[in-house]
Amino acid sequence: DVKVTQSSRYLVKRTGEKVFLECVQDMDHENMFWYRQDPGLGLRLIYFSYDVKMKEKGDIPEGYSVSREKKERFSLILESASTNQTSMYLCAIQDRVSGGYTFGSGTRLTVV
Amino acid sequence: AQSVTQLDSQVPVFEEAPVELRCNYSSSVSVYLFWYVQYPNQGLQLLLKYLSGSTLVESINGFEAEFNKSQTSFHLRKPSVHISDTAEYFCAVSENQGAQKLVFGQGTRLTINP
């Protein structure tokens, strides 16, 4: 089974800090995604990538950027963290055949 | 653009009772449909999916969902729930062409009472 690893389970950062959230897969999947999960809002797509050095904005990209220098790693960057970015962040890779996702276990980020 | 509506944010039921979690979607093209489950303090796991063929799909733990194209629905059902089914359930849709990124509903929290 494919494995998606998010580097931190819990993270606390201060307002204005630059924050890096890392996601690593152990297979050769091209498509990788970053979502944030908030109560009552479900999962909202921040950014996605179809291959190395490729990135596309999702539905809520403001305040975020991404980096994909190697196929297995997709990083989400909060340029200047704000309290409204306190959330659960989920990384996912996409199966080529079914289109379904495998998710990482998530990073719960608190910005104080 | 696609969208997904889960009509109930919370569904409380008694153990061994039947349950239905509702999901409606909108899309201008053919779709793939998914249900994901998130148990407390865990990540999301795929529960079942509809890609093509039979409109009734089943999971290994007794859930089933039926794709109804005319009603643009993909409701999730289980005839008899167990305490261990307590979780949040997310319906998701993707177009079966092009980008194929998933759009998720708001989630339904299923609570099973003894």
Image (tube, coloured by chain):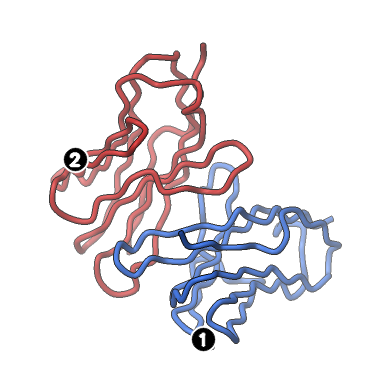
Chain colours: A blue, B red
Q: Amino acid at mark 1?
A: Val
**Quadrant in the picture for residue A62:** bottom right
Badge 2 crowding class, 10 Å Cα cut-off, few under 14, some 14 to 19, many 20 or more, is few
Q: Amino acid at mark 2?
A: Leu
Query: Marks 1/2: CA distance?
Result: 37 Å
Residue bearing mark 1? A52
x and y percent of residue A109 in the render? 73, 56
Give residue B110's mark.
Answer: none
x and y percent of residue B108 in the render? 46, 36
- In the image, is residue A71 above or below residue A58? below
Q: Which quadrant, please, contains the N terminus of chain B?
A: bottom left
- In the image, is residue A35 above or below residue B25? below
Give the camera-side residue of B72 and A21.
A21
x and y percent of residue A11 in the render? 78, 57
Residue at image location 44% in from the left, 79% down from the top? A50
Give the camera-side residue of A98 and B67.
A98
Secondary structure beneath label 2: strand
- Left or right relative to B9: residue A69: right
Residue bearing mark 2? B56
Residue at image location 28% in from the left, 35% down from the top? B64
